[in-house]
Structures are given as structure tokens and as C-alpha cells.
Amino acid sequence: MATVKVGINGFGRIGRLVFRAALNYPEIEVLGINDLVPPQTIAYLLKYDSTHGRFKGTVEAEADGIVVNGKKIPCVSIKNPEELPWTKLGVEYVVESTGLFTTYDGASKHLQAGAKRVVISAPTKNPDLVPTLLMGVNHDTYNPGIDSIVSNASCTTNCLAPIAKVINDNFGLAEGLMTTIHAMTATQPTVDGPIDTPRPIRAGILHSTIRLAQPGRNQEE
């Protein structure tokens, strides 16, 4: 089987978990990481994870990359995707996990930098141009001849769609209502502050903790 040569753009929560998962598949090789933090920080965040536990392997930082289980992985800090050295590093598939380049034009900058395929780890803002594919739901609609950029949708969609598909395929599904109980994310503020949608403005963890500690308080206070 041919090696899948991967580059990760954005080494946050998703980028690090993609990296960890890739190590379980010998046919996948991560050849480069792009993030604006230095290799020392990348190595530390990979090694220690408050949710998933300590990395089961060796991780060391060097000036221009990290060494994982004895293998050197170059790290760069480049803001503009079209300037990334994917061709030089031999990267063919890019995981776009910064959360910033979710449009077709934004993700296609990786193609300009030499990549052949891009997977956006978030919902795309151009669903008419970027197909959304979920494993076990509609992954068989992927057309390698034209789909150079795809979206893997949101975490909520990946949780809901497989269940909805089973119900719809077996019984039919006319309409539904769902609620997400979500883990904490980097975009959740710790205190009240400006954000792009009204509800999370006062959904900081501090406010939630205070209300939980004082169950008699009115939610509108």
C-alpha cells in the first residue's frame, strides 16, 4: 500500500489528535507540521494532554522540529498557507485544522503550496464548492477526480449523522430535534466577553460554575 504523506496545518486540539491517530497506521506518515508556536510548545502539548493523557512514546523538541519515537518531523511557523513548503517536505495530503481556512479559496492555498488534497477539519463555508464527507454516512460519494478539497463537518455532525442515517434508512426520518452537550473548547470564554454569537457571551465557564454553586440563582441574573 502506498504511503499517505500528510501535513498538519494547525496543531491545536484537532491537529494533535490527528497526529496521535496517524501513528496507529503504518501507511500514514506525517511529514510536516505548521503552527505559529515554537517546536518546544508543540512537543509539550503533544506529550501532555489533560483529556487524553500522556503520549505513549517519546517526544523531544529541536530548533526546527520535533522528534517523535525517534523520527524527526519538521515544524514551521508560516501564517499564509500558500507559502508553506509542502512540496519540499513531500506532503500530498493536508489536514487543515486551524479553523481559519474553511472556505474553498482559503483551503485551496494548500494546493498552491504543492499539496494534492486538503481535508478541512470543520464545516466549510462553501458547501456548494467543498463536499462534506462523513465516514459511514456518505463517504462513498467521494470523487477523487474532482474533489481535491473536502470537509469532515463538525464534531456534532459526526456524532449525530451516523445515528440519523440508521434511523432514516430503517424507519424513515421526517424531522428531529437535537441537543448537544459539548466538551469545553478553545473558543469558549472563561469569563464574559465579546464573541460572534450572543449566547456564548455569557456562557463562560466561570459564570456556569457560579450558577451551579448557587442553584437558587435565576439564569437571567
Image (cartoon, rainbow, N blue to C red):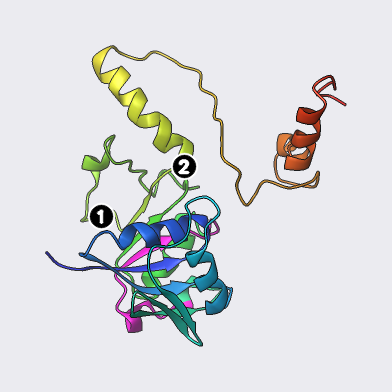
Q: CA distance from mark 2 to mark 1?
A: 22 Å
**x and y percentages locating residue 162 in the rendered image:** 33, 30
* Residue occupied by mark 1: 146
Q: Is residue 124 above or below residue 73?
A: above
Q: Is residue 105 above or below residue 32?
A: above
Three-letter code for the amino acid on which mark 2 is drawn: Ser
Q: Secondary structure at mark 2?
A: loop
Earlier-in-chain disc, 2 versus 1: 1
Give the quadrant of the C terminus: top right
**Circle 2 residue:** 154
Task: For residue 77, say whether it is visible.
Answer: no
Q: Nearer the viewer, residue 24 or 102?
A: 24
Residue 93 visible somewhere in the drawing: yes
Q: Residue at x 72, y 47 (%)?
A: 189
Picture coordinates of residue 102, whole percent (x, y): 49, 54
Magenta span contains residue 117: no
> The residue tagged with tag 1: helix, strand or loop?
loop
Where residue 104 sits in the image (x, y, percent)? 44, 56
Provide the residue span drawn in magenta: 83-100
Please indicate whether residue 86 sits to the left or right of residue 26 in the image: right
**Percent of width and height locating residue 193:** 80, 47
Neighbours of disc 2 within 10 Å: few (<14), some (14-19), many (20+): some
Furthest residue in direction right, as rendered: 221
Residue found 56% across the figure and 31% down from its top: 181
* Left or right: residue 50 compared with residue 21: right
Is 31 placed above or below 8 here?
below
Residue at (73%, 37%) from the top-left corner? 203
Q: What amino acid is at disc 1?
A: Ile
Residue lying farthest to the bottom in this orientation: 63
At label 1, counting other C-alpha atoms closer than 10 Å, the crowd grade (few under 14, some 14-19, many 20 or more) is few
Q: Is residue 201 left or right of residue 188?
A: right
